[in-house]
Image: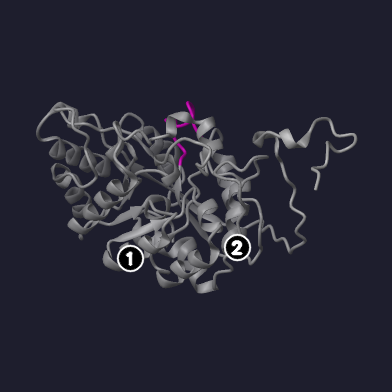
């Protein structure tokens, strides 16, 4: 059987179509729902409103953001951007100007381990000072395990016991810790044609951490994270990005079973969760009090909220998880969860209200 030649009138031979030029339109005819506002009040437990990720204020007009929140039924946002040199500005701009609508989590200085012994105590003192100034939680970014080194040049893993004073300080102040360990598993895999997120890595090659001479393997980081959570049962941990393991919901289920002090937010992982909707729904129904809504947006947008509400509230199938012409986290679509109302209320707000101080009821 001969192979057909170029389509008549086509501008080029489609047999040589480049991946980045392939923009397929789905021919599926299915129901579509685009909720303008959430069915129940929402707390966005993972968002970025500061300056460190965007160069300027992520939310340039706070009044407009609050109006958008009201329209979308978002009652409060957790701002994870309280870095040491910006915390007071974040608190003044958001928390104090709009009490109950925003709370800010503090960062600590991850250069401290390179300054020698006692860094855990110094970082604990930083957290206590941040809480005194008004911070409501601690955000730990993925630098821990990937980049932070001690004064001997050794990489600091999440379960390094020298950090114990920091986690103990969080426990003593009832301060939850939102912790991001590792990154998507594909970022640790060979950077080649079989990598399912190769287009994303081509856009951001600095995100690739597959060089084993410089970085630990994904499983080593996740193992360290679980040891940390188990070693500090009095500390409340919120594992960012589905407890840092959105590609392995079986392990997330096991971690939630084993560690009552661990919860998980869903920030920036709708793409992963939505391509396995039955497993995701089963996980949430098994742990309805341990999953927190979050967008990880810089700042949250109406499009991000509409997609998230559609995912959690509807039974829609095979829809885009982002508005980009090329899906940013992988070439697939997602399907909705259609969660029961009582579970939806818990995921949307009740779990965050229970775990995070300072939020409006």
Q: Nearer the viewer, residue 2 or 5?
A: 2
Q: Nearer the viewer, residue 26 or 301?
A: 26
- Measure the C-alpha gap from mark 2 to mark 1: 24 Å
Which residue corresponds to the image point at 73% horizontal and 45% vertical from the top-left? 24
Q: With 323 as the anchor, is 202 left or right in this view?
A: left
| Residue 350: mark in rendering | none
Query: Count of labels shown?
Result: 2
Query: How far across and how far down the image is residue 307, in percent?
Result: 61, 53
Which residue corresponds to the image point at 86% horizontal and 38% vertical from the top-left? 7
Q: With 93 as the anchor, is 165 left or right in this view?
A: left
Q: Quadrant of residue 93?
A: top left
Query: How far across and how far down the image is residue 346, in percent?
Result: 46, 67
Q: Considering the whole magenta stretch, tell me its main secondary structure.
A: loop
Query: How far across and how far down the image is residue 115, in percent?
Result: 15, 27
Q: Which residue is mark 1?
A: 254
Residue pushed farthest left?
117
In reply to whether residue 68 is colored magenta, the answer given is no
* Secondary structure found at label 2: loop
For the C terminus, give its image quadrant: bottom left
Specify whether residue 181 is in view. no
Other residues around mark 1 within 10 Å, as few (<14) / some (14–19) / many (≥20): few
Q: How is the image coloured?
A: one colour
Q: Quadrant of residue 36?
A: bottom right
Q: Nearer the viewer, mark 2 or mark 1?
A: 1
Query: How far across and how far down the image is residue 351, in percent?
Result: 40, 63
State if disc 1 and disc 2 touch (CB < 8 Å).
no
Q: Which residues are magenta?
A: 48-58
Residue pushed farthest front?
1
Specify whether residue 266 is in view. yes
Q: Which residue is mark 2?
A: 336
């Amino acid at each position: 059987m001969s192979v057909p030649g170029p389509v008549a009138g086509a501008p080029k031979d489609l047999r040589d179509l480049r991946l980045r030029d392939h923009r397929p339109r789905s021919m599926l005819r299915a129901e579509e729902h685009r909720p303008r506002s959430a069915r129940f009040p929402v707390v966005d437990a993972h968002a970025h409103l500061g300056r460190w990720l965007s160069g300027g204020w992520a939310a340039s007009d706070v009044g407009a953001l609050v109006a958008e929140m009201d329209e979308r039924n978002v009652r409060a946002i957790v701002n994870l951007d309280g870095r040491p040199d910006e915390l007071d500005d974040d608190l003044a701009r958001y928390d104090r100007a709009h009490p109950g609508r925003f709370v800010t989590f503090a960062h600590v200085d991850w250069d401290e381990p390179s300054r020698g012994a006692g860094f855990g105590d110094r970082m604990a003192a930083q957290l206590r000072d941040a809480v005194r100034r008004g911070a409501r939680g601690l955000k730990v970014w993925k630098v821990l395990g990937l980049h932070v080194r001690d004064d001997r040049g050794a990489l600091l893993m999440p379960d390094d016991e020298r950090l114990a004073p920091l986690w103990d300080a969080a426990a003593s102040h009832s301060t939850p810790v939102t912790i991001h360990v590792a990154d998507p598993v594909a970022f640790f895999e060979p950077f080649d044609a079989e990598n399912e997120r190769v287009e994303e890595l081509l856009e951001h090659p600095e995100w690739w951490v597959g060089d084993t001479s410089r970085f630990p393997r994904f499983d080593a980081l996740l193992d360290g994270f679980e040891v940390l959570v188990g070693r500090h049962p009095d500390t409340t941990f919120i594992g960012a990005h589905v407890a840092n393991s959105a590609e392995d919901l079986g392990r997330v289920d096991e971690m939630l079973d084993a560690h009552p002090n661990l919860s998980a937010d869903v920030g920036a992982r709708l793409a992963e969760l939505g391509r396995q909707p039955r497993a995701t729904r089963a996980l949430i129904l098994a742990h309805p009090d341990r999953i927190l809504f979050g967008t990880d947006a810089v700042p949250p947008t109406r499009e991000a909220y509409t997609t998230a509400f559609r995912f959690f509230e509807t039974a829609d199938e095979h829809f885009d998880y982002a508005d980009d012409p090329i899906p940013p986290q992988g070439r697939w679509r997602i399907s909705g969860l259609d969660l029961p109302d009582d579970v939806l209320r818990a995921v949307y707000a009740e779990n965050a209200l229970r775990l995070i101080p300072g939020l409006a009821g």
